Each structure stands twice: as C-alpha cells, then as structure tokens.
Image (spheres, rainbow, N blue to C red):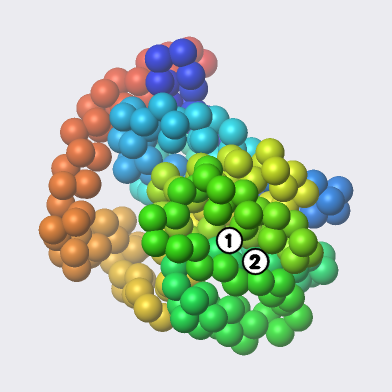
C-alpha cells in the first residue's frame, strides 16, 4: 500500500508483524541499524502539511500499518497489509533483542515513566539488557544539538535498539537523523508504547480493540485534543479511498 505526496511516495513496505520481525532479526545478525515507522491517518495528515515530516518518513527502512483505516485502504487497493500497532511492537522487539544479545535504550517521556517501563520490560524479559534511558529536555528539537548529543550517547552506550516515545513527528525525525549519525542502531517509533508498559496510560479494553473502535475510546477519553485530530483524519479519507481504487486498477 502506498500514499502519494506530489512527486514522493510513502509505502507500507512491511506487510505483517512476522515480516517485520524477520527483517529486524536479519539486521541484528548483520550488525546493521534500521528505522521503523508505524503509519496512520494522523501521520498522513501531518505529511501533507510538513515537508520535514515527509522527508523523515522517506528515510525509514520499514513502515507498517498502525491503524485499521490503513488496513482497509490497503484491501481496497488490492495490496493488503496487516495491522501492526506501534504500541504492540515494544515487548516482541525487546524479546527479539534479548534473544540476539542486543542491548536496548529507551528515549522519551519522563525519567520516572522510562524507569517504570524499563522495570516492566525486565520483569517480562529477564535476559533483557537496558543500556540507557534518556528523557530529553522540554522543547526537544529532534534534529538539533541535543539530538546529536543523545545519538553520541546512544552510540557509546552499546545499545543496538532504541525505542522512541517522543510522539510524531519528533520520533520519526530523530530516527531519520539516527540513520545518518548512528547507523548501527535500530530505531523504533512507538508513540505511547512505553507509557502503556509503565502504566501511566491505559489502552482500550480488548473487546473495543477487536471492534476497531479504539479511536472512539481514545477520543472520549481526551476529546479536546483528539476530536480535532480525528476530524482532520476523516476529512482526508475520501481522497485516500480514490487513490486506493486507482491503485487497485493497476494490478
């Protein structure tokens, strides 16, 4: 599944969690870094309005579908992909890192939340090595001086995998810079994934997720912030559906 932005194309190039884990394992074995992004409608809205965010997405190695609308659009385009939420990548990728003797780093949120997330991960995965936890300062610029200093710290820490809980677009922009300055580290943009593990945020009940209504649950939980966001997402759906139908006819 792909999405066009004038002369550029952002493509969901990893169709399932299994395909992603297989690709990451290959990178771990080869000692090579990577960047993983989880695309959703909000990201597509942001990319339409930010050349900088679009450029960061174009530098990601693996892009998966984070959101049922992306999955539905892929089916409409006859290029089906599976749902791979970023929040559900943290534990499996951390376990994969432990199996390959790769130390991890946690970046974002607050020191307290990161420590709670680190404890939660090590409770689940006793063999997991956590090299460092870093909470950037307020107003963090993901491509500025502090970002470069953090990347140097990550390089020196021995981490081979870094979970980024900075929110979009900061985490994707930081990952893009990381691919340049820390090419042996894998970067995974996971949004609130660490907060879920730390317990500072709670996901929708499983039955709500199964009905593909997690977005409604989240919107009701924080309407002031999320109602405008979801309105913008709904606004672009018709044009995305048209684009998907055009793709389906190219097969």
Secondary structure under the numbered disc 1 in the rendered image: strand
Residue drawn at x 53%, y 58% is: 164
Relative to the observer, which residue lies in front, 245 or 115?
A: 115
Q: Which residue is mark 1?
A: 163
Residue 55: percent from left, percent from top: 50, 29
Q: Which mark is residue 144?
A: none
Using the rendered image of the protein, determine whether residue 76 is visible from the camera's viewpoint.
Answer: no
Using the rendered image of the protein, determine whether residue 209 is visible from the camera's viewpoint.
Answer: yes
Q: How many marks?
A: 2
Q: Which residue is mark 2?
A: 105
Q: Is residue 79 left or right of residue 222?
A: right
Residue drawn at x 75%, y 66% is: 157
- Looking at the rendering, which quadrant does residue 166 occupy? bottom left
Residue 213: percent from left, percent from top: 26, 58
Mark 2 neighbour class, 10 Å CA radius: few under 14, some 14 to 19, many 20 or more: many
Relative to the observer, which residue lies in front, 13 or 53?
A: 53
Residue drawn at x 14%, y 60% is: 223
Q: CA distance from mark 2 to mark 1?
A: 6 Å
Secondary structure under the numbered disc 2 in the rendered image: strand
Mark 2 and 1 residues: CB-CB less than 8 Å, in contact?
Answer: yes
Residue 187: percent from left, percent from top: 62, 52
Q: Is residue 242 left or right of residue 223?
A: right
Q: Is residue 213 above or below residue 119?
A: above
Q: Is residue 62 left or right of residue 55?
A: right
Q: Is residue 85 above or below residue 33?
A: below
**Furthest residue in direction right, as rendered:** 30
Residue drawn at x 36%, y 47% is: 68
Choose the circle earlier in sequence order: 2 or 1: 2
């Amino acid at each position: 599944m792909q999405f066009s932005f004038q002369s550029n194309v952002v493509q969901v190039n990893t169709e399932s969690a299994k395909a992603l884990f297989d690709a990451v394992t290959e990178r771990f074995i080869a000692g090579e870094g990577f960047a993983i992004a989880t695309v959703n409608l909000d990201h597509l809205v942001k990319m339409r309005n930010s050349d900088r965010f679009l450029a960061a997405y174009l530098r990601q190695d693996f892009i998966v579908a984070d959101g049922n609308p992306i999955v539905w659009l892929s089916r409409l385009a006859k290029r089906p992909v599976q749902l791979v939420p970023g929040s559900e990548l943290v534990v499996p990728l951390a376990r994969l890192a432990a199996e390959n003797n790769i130390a991890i780093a946690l970046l974002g949120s607050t020191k307290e939340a990161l420590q709670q997330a680190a404890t939660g991960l090590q409770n689940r995965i006793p063999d997991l090595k956590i090299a460092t936890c870093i909470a950037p300062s307020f107003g963090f610029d993901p491509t500025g001086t502090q970002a470069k200093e953090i990347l140097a710290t990550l390089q020196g820490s021995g981490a081979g995998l870094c979970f980024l809980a900075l929110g979009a677009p900061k985490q994707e922009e930081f990952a893009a810079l990381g691919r340049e300055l820390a090419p042996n580290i894998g970067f995974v943009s996971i949004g609130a994934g660490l907060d879920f593990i730390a317990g500072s945020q709670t996901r929708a009940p499983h039955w709500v997720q199964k009905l593909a209504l997690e977005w409604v649950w989240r919107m009701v939980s924080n309407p002031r912030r999320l109602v405008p966001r979801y309105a913008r997402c709904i606004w672009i759906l018709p044009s995305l559906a048209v684009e998907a139908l055009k793709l389906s006819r190219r097969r």
